[in-house]
């Protein structure tokens, strides 16, 4: 399990590095063109503007696409009182089973979609196969086998990471 997480982290870092290198290459080309046409003062001012703008942009991008968060984690089981009219079938049209989780719709809209894997700190790796009711926000619901287990699980806050495996 640790090897898969390490591979996922390395893959994400490699992708970030490639994106950064591409941005730097484009920036270098832009600066080269500017250096040949602008005065030294204009050139220095533009370099300063680009550096500040890129740092702000990268920070905003990082904040928007952060794959790790502190979320509310609860549990559910296949009862019609906790689901829709067909409690055995998840929103992904697959059967619910151990290892299945439902995510809140705000997470789903940010790419936490069916089939993606999620690591919940202290609990393990789960697969997104279901959606929570629209009233929930920044939350995950783990499928458990019965009502007693779900009640015993309770409501927790945990660090959760969206994996790229």
Image (cartoon, rainbow, N blue to C red):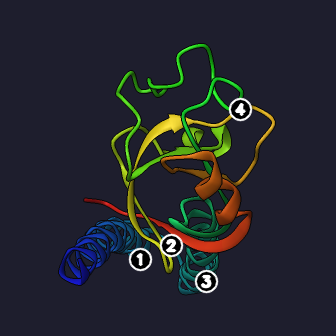
Q: Is the N terminus in the top left, top right, bottom left or bottom right quadrant?
A: bottom left
What residue would you read off at disc 3? 48
Residue 5 position, x and y percent, is: 28, 76
Q: Is residue 128 left or right of residue 47?
A: left
Which of the two labelled residues, at mark 3 and mark 2, occupies the earlier sequence position?
A: 2
- For marks 3 and 2, give the CA distance: 14 Å
Residue pointed to by mark 1: 35
Q: Which residue is mark 4?
A: 133
Q: Please state which of the two labelled residues, at mark 3 or mark 2, is closer to the viewer.
A: 3
C-beta proximity under 8 Å, tags 1 and 4: no
- Residue at image x 64%, y 23%? 80
* 32, 80: nearer the viewer: 80
Tell me which residue sits at (49%, 80%) in the image.
122
Q: CA distance from mark 4 to mark 3?
A: 47 Å
Residue 12 picture location, percent across and down: 31, 70
Q: How many angstroms separate mark 2 from mark 4 (CA)?
A: 57 Å
Q: Check disc 2 and report the residue beneath it.
A: 38
């Amino acid at each position: 399990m640790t090897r898969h997480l390490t591979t996922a982290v390395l893959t994400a870092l490699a992708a970030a590095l490639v994106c950064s290198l591409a941005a730097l290459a484009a920036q270098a080309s832009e600066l080269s063109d500017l250096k040949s046409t602008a005065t030294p003062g204009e050139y220095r001012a533009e370099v300063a503007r680009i550096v500040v703008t890129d740092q702000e942009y990268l920070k905003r991008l990082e904040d928007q696409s952060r794959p790790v968060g502190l979320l509310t984690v609860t549990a559910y089981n296949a009862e019609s009182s906790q689901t829709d009219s067909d409690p055995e079938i998840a929103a992904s049209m697959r059967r619910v089973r151990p290892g299945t989780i439902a995510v809140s719709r705000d997470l789903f809209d940010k790419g936490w979609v069916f089939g993606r894997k999620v690591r919940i700190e202290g609990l393990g790796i789960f697969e997104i196969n279901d959606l929570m009711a629209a009233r929930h926000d920044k939350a995950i619901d783990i499928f458990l086998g019965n009502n007693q287990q779900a009640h015993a699980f309770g409501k927790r806050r945990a660090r959760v990471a969206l994996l790229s495996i």
